[in-house]
Image: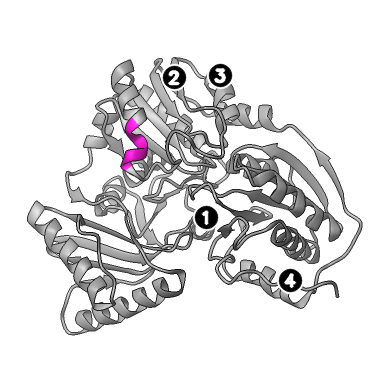
Amino acid sequence: MTLAHNFHPTVLREYDIRGIIGKTLTTDDARAIGRGFGTMVVRGGGKKVAIGYDGRLSSPDLEAAAVDGLKSTGLHVVRIGLGPTPMLYFTARHLKLDAGMMITGSHNPPDYNGFKMMIGKAPFFGSQILEIGKIAAAGDFATGEGSEETIDIQDAYVDRLAADYDGTRDLNVVWDNGNGAAGEILRRLVKKLPGTHTLLFDDIDGTFPNHHPDPTIPENLEDIIHKVAEQKADLGIAFDGDADRIGAVDEKGRIVWGDQLVAIYSKDVLAAFPGATIIADVKASQTLFDQIAKLGGKPLMWKTGHSLLKAKMAETNSPLAGEMSGHIFFADKYYGFDDALYCAVRLLGLVSRLGELSALRDELPEVLNTPEVRFQVSEERKFAAVDEIKARVKAEEAAGGPEVNDIDGVRVKNADGWWLLRASNTQDVLVARAEAFSPDGLERLKGAIKTNLAKSGIAAPADF
């Protein structure tokens, strides 16, 4: 038994650990996370773990504390330094290590930070994360004499990214790194790719001085849309803060959302894996599921969350999965984890071989939809509010009302289209989305969302 540690109740989440630096997450927490995670690795027979960190100002201190915690359990720690989250995943697979830990705040504001982990080839989430809390609260840490080494994995990672490029013509590409953790890797990658490449905000800066690194928010893509038009580029590609989520813009300056990208990738993947299961989250367009079926695949709707989709992919032997948020996973030629840099390489190959990105996008039927709309709701209230709404719409369904999918929040389908409301696992918000066949239908779906929120005491913004 060693000194017990208790975490802030909001820090241990469904598929990662996340908090506000100095308020809900400290270096003492990081050390305890290292000890707790290390204990689980050691007790599972593991001996070696990789660790990396993103470009946030707090990340080096959290990494150092986590290394101390990991070593205290007897593990050998392989430190890879600053870089994107998928480089950490790659390191664990490439070097055949037993586990991996990434310090990253992903797409959250600069004062946030957190941890993403893996054991073996699998994501570490849900009850496993809660187990860290239980071990820490009991002070039930493993003890041992650990060790560490620092390695440079960047060249090996970039070589692997570039290996699957299969384009046939040069492209003019604009990249927006958003001052995120992929900057150095991106600079090395584009040198290995043919064509013309323009990099925006490739310097890593944890204050994110140009725009927030979240490609699901349209205003964060204004710089790249402008530059694509200015350069007359074939497409633009953007990353979130740790480069496990991709955003894209076609040559006409239109945003190509994550579910549309999965539909485009499906053409390639299903040609090589006929009849395969392709997975998308509950926020994805119905047009994606219809397109997968049209191409001969088996569409599967699943819960939102990168760890949850990775686990479902392994369970179903799926070669491709993706989220509306831009987490996209290839397991046809790659490792099955979310790597926006790899997704970018595959997208360049597709556009180079098959034609303009706008044409690939326009193969999907036209529908009207909202982006992901976020309603601020406290951590303590958000899940309860969704449960209340779920109970109401399920009762309506039982009485002959619209069809309800409650695999993750509530997705209600009717003659107008569908609407979704779910609690975010990474932020104190409810996330909504609606998709319709007509403008009037979209307004009715948005009205249903606002009505259900109001019944739970939550006011929607006036412009929704």
Which of the marked residues, 3 or 2, is nearer the chain's N terminus? 3
Horizontal arrangement in the rendering, residue 440 relative to residue 5 (left or right): left
Q: Nearer the viewer, residue 92 or 266?
A: 92
* Residue 184 visible: yes
Which of the marked residues, 1 or 3, is nearer the chain's N terminus? 3
User: How many angstroms separate mark 1 from mark 3 (CA)?
Assistant: 29 Å
Secondary structure of residue under mark 1: helix
Which of the marked residues, 4 or 2, is nearer the chain's N terminus? 4
Which of the marked residues, 4 or 1, is nearer the chain's N terminus? 4
Residue 365 sits above or below residue 196 on the image? below
Type of amino acid under label 2: Thr
Q: Which residue is mark 1?
A: 310
User: How many angstroms separate mark 3 from mark 2 (CA)?
Assistant: 14 Å
Q: Position of residue 258 (x, y in %)?
A: 36, 44
Answer few, some or many: residues within 10 Å of disc 1's Cα (few below 14, many 20 plus, some between 14 and 19).
Answer: many
Q: Which residue is mark 3?
A: 192
Answer few, some or many: residues within 10 Å of disc 2's Cα (few below 14, many 20 plus, some between 14 and 19).
Answer: some
Q: Which residues are magenta?
A: 218-222
* Residue 268 visible: no
